[in-house]
Image (cartoon, helix red, strand yellow):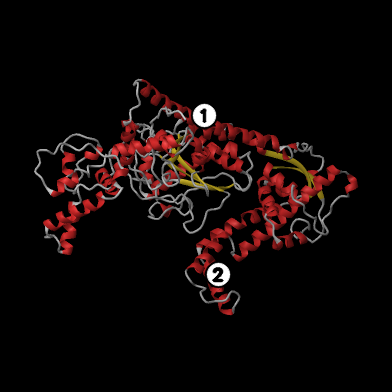
Amino acid sequence: MATSASASTSSPFPFPTRRPPDDTLFYAVYPLPLPTALPPPDLHAALRSLHLSLSSHLAPFLASHLFHRDAFALTIPPPDHTAATSPCALCASPPVPHLHGALRFGDSLADEWLGVSLLFELTRAFPGLAARAWDSDGEFLLIEAAFALPRWLDPDTAPNRVFIFRGELHILPPSLFPATPSLDAALAAVHDDAVDTRAPDAVQAAIQRRIAGLPEKASENLHTARVIVPVPVAKVLKEEPCLIARAVEGFYDRDIDTMKHAARMEKFLKGPGGEGVEMVRTSVRMTRAMYAQLVQQNFQAPRGYPMPRREEGPEKWMEAELGMKIACGFEMMYQERRREGEEGKGSTWEVYRKSLEATGCFNGLLPGSKEYKRVMEDAMQYYKSSSLFSRTREILSAPVRRIDEILAMPYSAEEFEGSGLPPSDDDSWLYNGEDELAAELCARQQEMEEYETAKQYRKSQRKNVSGSSSSQSNEFNLGEITESMQEFVRKMSSFEGAEVPANRKDMESVDLDVNQFFKAMESVLGRSKDEPGNEAGFDGKSSSSDIDLEDDSDYGSDFGEESGEKGMDNAFMESYSDALNKELSMTTIEKSFARAPHPDTSNEGPSGAADTDGEMTPVDVDLNLVESFLNSYSSQQGLPGPASNLLGLMGVKVPPDGKKP
């Protein structure tokens, strides 16, 4: 399976040149096995059938629920995407059969997790369906389960490894795909029952805690309030209750330009002939986030807007003030959407304009100048003639067109008189959020404590194993230090730093050239294999200092060929080595290292170099290593320090210092 993996990666973000919106959930669903063998017409028909089945399954919930910004919806990619080779424009998915969507949740994080719960529900109801979900933070599901994730999983290794399948989270391990898998290979692995890709139980529990009770409990996030609004606003809300989201968005995101529309109120406060309209009381259902955005902002009613006197009671004043904000939001949203639809200055126009700037169309032109305006007008004309503009205009004008259709129907204030309105919901939750915040903080604190407890338990288990092994022998084995250090330097680490293996018995194969490492170490300690007399130290069995180290013969050959010094006089080198050894013997450097016992050389012939080498016996690297560790450990006087930390990480437990002060 791993051999089919591709090293190519696909960015989870649909915007290659700009950061995706911070308030949008992106998702994609894939039918498994992928119907890639179907011709494009049949494939598109299969996707339409799947889209109908999924929409029908979610219809009972979506028909009654109100989202803060956008509703959860799945769309079919354009037919030409099936035969395309570039990633999908919305979800950046490679050209594999899928449905996708984007849910703007604004300030309501509950909607983001509601969308996630719907993906879990769909994959549970349709076993042959896999899904992905991400936002501007990337794989945010992994962030939620951060304390339960394996150490290898990070933002660099996560692409094309995290999926929702059969109502559970699946993570493709590196043992299956050492490199980043291609999307089709990853989906094939998820669909293969013989391959275990299910995420650990701790990860599943962390995600399920966040979506527990959803989508059934989503109604608890809604709030119903009585309001006094102009009758056109009441008519629109009666026919299309979901448009309250657009009205609140228009009010909350207002600026100086849009507030000019609210000051005139030409659409919702004036009749067809310019006459005033009646005010009616109605009931509005919205999300709690919408209600908070309306109530918690001070906003002066426009001049001419009919507001009751405060003497009429606080309840009526609050209903009128809340209705005024909704009416102004409708006016600002309607007028701004209509203007953008007429001028074509929607979000896609901004993307198109920035692409022109990036390609240098306006280089050297002063904004506002005659030439700048001419180039801008030409670009606008080209944009309006493109299909991109027509699609954008249709989207922007959708609420405008629907509002015009509703207000074109006959209506009057009598429709809203005498109808029994439900009372406003209690909004104490808006002011008593401390308890909810404290509960959330306690849950997070408990999660961190459980993580630390498990971490300490694993640490104590390692100590117990180390203690039991040391108790079986009456004396401390100094060889553990050298063995642990050798295994440590053999461990191949990543660019993020060296890591000590948790279990030294399960070490990976050697990837480090240990011979070159010890050669460099011994050269620093003052020993060279090529020194005369040192050959005797390699005859018998000794410590690691007696390892037969290979010299850089290849390097020497290359260097000799390049420099032309391959035929250097050997006698000169021997004389030079004798002189160097004699010079070093008069210094104190050799006395700072412990040396291995000098083997018997009585059978060797006399030589000037042998006399000198009698004093320059090989350095015992293991003995010096152990001695340095013990001296450092002893100097800590029982306190934490580098020696005890490093030895502890390698699983070596040093007994207390037996020396008395």
Q: Name the side, left or right, on which 113 lies relative to 5.
A: right
Residue 280: x %, y % from top left: 81, 47
Numbered badge on residue 75: none
Which residue is more in the foreground, 570 or 7? 570
Q: Residue 401, position in %: x, y?
A: 64, 56
Left or right relative to 15: residue 513? left
Depicted 477 relative to depicted 529: above or below: above
On the rendered structure, is 496 left or right of 540?
A: right
What's under tag 2, amino acid-wise? Met
Which numbered tag is attached to residue 380?
A: 2
Residue 260 in view here: yes
- 477 vs 604: above or below: above
In the rendered image, the residue lying farthest to the bottom is 370
Q: Viewer-nearest of labels 1 and 2? A: 1
- The residue tagged 1 is 453
Q: Quadrant of the N terminus?
A: top left
Q: In terms of secondary structure, where does tag 2 sit?
A: helix
Q: Quadrant of residue 158?
A: top left
Of the numbered discs 1 and 2, the one sitting upstream in the chain is 2
- Where in the figure is residue 615, as x and y percent of width and height? 22, 43
Inter-mark Cα distance, 1 to 2: 62 Å
